[in-house]
Amino acid sequence: MKQKNVANFEKVAGELIVSCQALNEEPLHSSFIMSKMALAARKGGAKGIRANSVEDIKCIREEVDLPIIGIIKRDYEDSEVYITPTITEIDELMEVNPEVIALDASINVRPKGESLEILMKEIKEKYPHQLLMADCSTINEAEMAEKLDFDFIGTTMVGYTKQSKGDKIESNDFYILREIIKHTTKPVIAEGNINTPKKAKRVLDLGAYSVVVGSSITRPQIITQNFVDEIKL
C-alpha cells in the first residue's frame, strides 16, 4: 500500500496541489461543491488535492483521480490543535485511504495532553503503510517532524500558532521554507499565504517538493475581500 501511495503521490512533485476546503460557516460549505472545485482545479492543471473530511474526499474521488492529502479539522476543548488531532480522525480518514494524511505537528498541547511522539507511534503501528505529512509552524517543529519520521513536511501552520505569531511563509524570500529545506532531508511541501502564481513558482525554484494553494483559488469570499481592500487603499 505504501509503495502504491508513494507512486501516486510522486505525480505532484514539482506541481500544484489545490486545497479544496470550506468550513461550516463559509458560503461554499458542501461536499458536492468541493468536488466540483476539485474538478475545476484538475481542469486547470492541478496535480493533487488537499481536502477536509471523509465526506468531501468521497465526493472529490467521484470527480477526479488526483492524489489527495486528507485531513479532518476538529476542535477539542482542551487543545489548540485542530488538524487531524487524534487517532480517531486518522481512523476515519483511513476509511477513504487518502494518499497522504496530514496532521498538526506543532508543539501545541494536543487533546488529553497526548504527545505527538505517542500519536505517531500509534499511527505507525496501526497503519504502517500510510504516508504522513507534518503541518509545521517553525523550523524546530520541522526538525522534530523529521526525527519522528514523517514522510513529508509542510509549512502549513506558519503564522497560525503562538510560537510563529507574526511570521509569514513568504517573508524574506521564504526564509522559513529555505531553512526547513536546508535542515531536513524529507520532501518539503510549501503551503500558507502563497497567493500568486509567481510565489508558487518561487517556492518550487527554492526546492519545495510541491506547493499547496488554497484560499486564493477556492475561497471566493477571501478573493473578493482582497480586491475590496486594494480598492480602498
Image (cartoon, grey):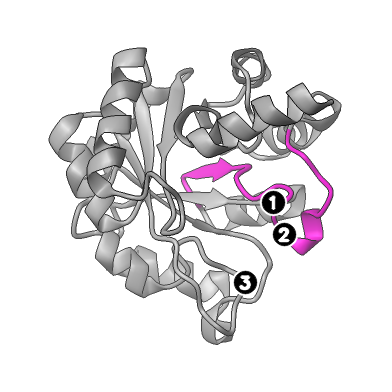
Q: Is the Cβ of the residue at disc 2 closer than 8 Å to that at disc 1?
A: yes
Mark sitting earlier along the chain (3/1): 3
The residue tagged 3 is 80
Q: Position of residue 220 (x, y in %)?
A: 49, 33
Q: Residues within 10 Å of mark 1 (few under 14, many from 20)?
A: many
Q: Is residue 157 magenta?
A: yes
Name the residue nearer the viewer: 192 or 5. Answer: 192
Farthest residue toward the left?
A: 62
Magenta segment, which residues? 150-169
Mark sitting earlier along the chain (2/1): 1
Judge depth for marks 2 and 1 and give the one in front.
2
Residue 152: image tag: none
| Residue at x-position 44% and y-position 70% | 121
Q: Residues within 10 Å of mark 2 (few under 14, many from 20)?
A: some
Q: Is the Cβ of the residue at disc 3 closer than 8 Å to that at disc 2?
A: yes
| Residue at x-position 47% and y-position 72% | 119
Q: In the shown orientation, is residue 98 left or right of residue 132?
A: left
Name the residue nearer the viewer: 26 or 129. Answer: 26
Q: Position of residue 55 (x, y in %)?
A: 23, 55
Mark 3, secondary structure of its residue: loop
Rendered position, 81 above or below 196: below
